[in-house]
Amino acid sequence: MGKIAILPDILCNQIAAGEVVERPAAVVKELLENSIDAGSSKISVSLIQGGRKEIRVVDNGCGMHPDDALMATERHATSKIASVEDLASVMTLGFRGEALPSIASVSRFELVTREASAVGGTRIRIEGGVLRDVCEAGCPPGTQVLVRDLFHNTPARQKFMRTAETELAYITDQFFRISLAHPEIHFQLSSQERLLHDFPKAQDTAQRAAQVFGRDLLSSFVRIEFEKDETEVSGYLCLPQVQRTNSQSLFLYVNGRPVWDRLLQRTVLAAYEALIPRGKYPVAAVFIRLSPAAVDVNVHPAKREIRFKKPGEVMRVLREALLGTLSGARPTAQVRPAAPDFFPREASSFAQAGFLRENQASFDFAPRRPAAAPVFGGGENVRAFPRVPPDQSSETIGFPPPEASPEITFASLPVIGQLANSFLLLEAPDGLVIIDQHAAHERVLFNRLLARTGASAAQLLTRPELVHLMPGEAALVKRWLPDLREMGFELEHFGGTDFSVHAVPAPLSEVPPAELIRDLLKFAEEDAPTGRSGLAASLAKVASCRGAVKAGMKLKPEEIRHLLEMLDDTSLPFTCPHGRPLWFKLSYDQILRSFKRT
Ligand code: ADP
Ligand code: MG
């Protein structure tokens, strides 16, 4: 008698379930994907105990014929592909035909489904993989899947489930990621019979992003739109002021599928280098589209991971798209009705309302870099400006068109003054802008140092300056020479451990050269990067910090103006090179709230 036997189906399904259904969130993901593939326009998810007790997904999609409904719960039964060639061009989210049988093998499962043209529907009950009941059922067109007591028959798996709260968090994450990719579908998520998230059909991804990320973030979003080498990159990036402590707000998609790909993630994070601090994460939703033949989606049972045929090329296009988008992003302002409404309607002695309007009219609204014009206005009561004057119609529009959030230039804003000789106060149409003068100048210098204009950015010293170093320091400086030269330094080894400095980067010409070199060396002691790639940026960070105006320095009005103009000419005027914000806005909303006026 041989020892080898073919495993029974139930066991196969339970084994498959181990990969496909690792936790309630995976069930929700599979069911949502099926409902989307079925062409639904509305999908609701309801949970009891974070899905541990019950998951119910109801859709209004195409439904199933009674024969298909039975088939669907069989292993490897799918309507989505029929041949190995299909696998290379699969456009549906599912194709493995594993989800329903796997889920049914580890739960008390019920499927109720009806095609729109059919008179009645079908109800199928399966418990732990065993078919219990098939009958006709009255139901609306579409499909409802009920998954109760997940893992009731696989105690080992059950132990791995976490608290209802944690499982709900995992599910919500999945729900967000999937909803964001399908603005055309109305999604609902309820828990314990309470509606937690309701995302009605949205006009576009922008509107859906507002539902998912919350409206406060909207004014910080910039649209990505890029195509090259048959790879399309689209979506939204948050300006670097918005920072998170984990990567959960990084939504990455390939051909409409949410993916967790290290390489993709690293590429996105790299685009934020020197914009946000190490250990902080941006908020972004990035969609990559390329020919289905250029990716293998069938490398992970739950399709979380994918494999690019040419990862290098995809990353190159992605990098270009992200850097182009970020470097074109400019600060924006919205015109809020709050301020004019707040000020007295009757002509006051200050005639504030008129005063405000005048100022608003003087803004430069022309998009400077149309390729990456910011798209969101933000807050709920944003009015299109300047088409609607602030004190006319009280009509509001929920989502302004892309042009409605005008870009502002810092230099065009009236300067109120300098606070504590450290912060510049400017008046924007929608509130008070506060700029950290040191951080702002640092960003200006950093960008100029890294502009790689080579010798053209070098300022020749009238007399070379000799710097005497310790042997270890001399060795370091020798190693740094190529990077220093690119920034505009000209150093010559003078003999022994002495160097003569012939030129310094023009933006740093005010700083005594020897001090500059010593500062760079001090940094080497503290946190020099290990790889060569980051060296130029790291040196530029130190040099720009050294060269920037300090906090506590009184600036003359023309110096303030000059700094603001330089900032306007700088790409990424959002954070300093260490990733700290260099400006923020205290909106009229916030101000009025502080005074309990709203
Ligand atoms: P796959 O999605 O990989 O094809 P599944 O096990 O998830 O495998 O589903 C099996 C089949 O059941 C699908 O191919 C589809 O034809 C059908 N199906 C599943 N869910 C639905 C639904 N919500 N509406 C209509 N048909 C569905
Ligand atoms: Mg499926």
Image (tube, helix red, strand yellow):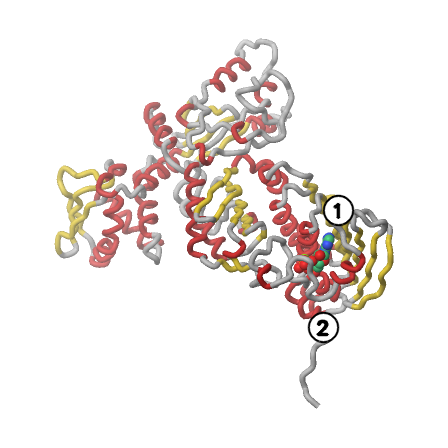
Disc on the earlier residue, 1 or 2: 2
In the depicted view, which residue is nearer to us: 50 or 199? 199
Q: Residue at x 68, y 88 (%)?
A: 2
Q: Residue 415 vs residue 299: left or right? A: left
Q: Is mark 2 on a helix, strand or loop?
A: helix
> What's the CA distance linking mark 1 and mark 2?
32 Å
Three-letter amino acid code at the position of disc 1: Asn
- Report which quarter residue 84 is drawn in: bottom right
Q: Residue 49 at what x, y percent from top left?
A: 75, 55
Q: Residue 302 vs residue 53: left or right? A: left
Q: Which residue is drawn at 56% across and 51% down?
A: 255
Q: In this view, does 426 lie above or below 535?
A: above
Mark carried by residue 11: 2
Three-letter amino acid code at the position of disc 2: Leu
Q: In this view, does 255 lie above or below 22?
A: above
Q: What element carries label 1?
A: loop
In the depicted view, which residue is nearer to us: 455 or 574? 455
Location of ligand 1 given as a quarter of the image: bottom right
Q: Looking at the image, can residue 162 be seen?
A: no
Mark 1 and mark 2 in contact? Answer it, CB < 8 Å. no
Q: Does the residue labelled 1 lie within 8 Å of ligand 1?
A: no
Q: Residue 449 at what x, y percent from top left?
A: 30, 42
Q: Does the residue labelled 2 lie within 8 Å of ligand 1?
A: no
- Report which quarter residue 547 is drawn in: top left
Q: Which of marks 1 and 2 is in front?
A: 1
Mark carried by residue 60: 1
Q: Residue 389 at what x, y percent from top left?
A: 56, 17
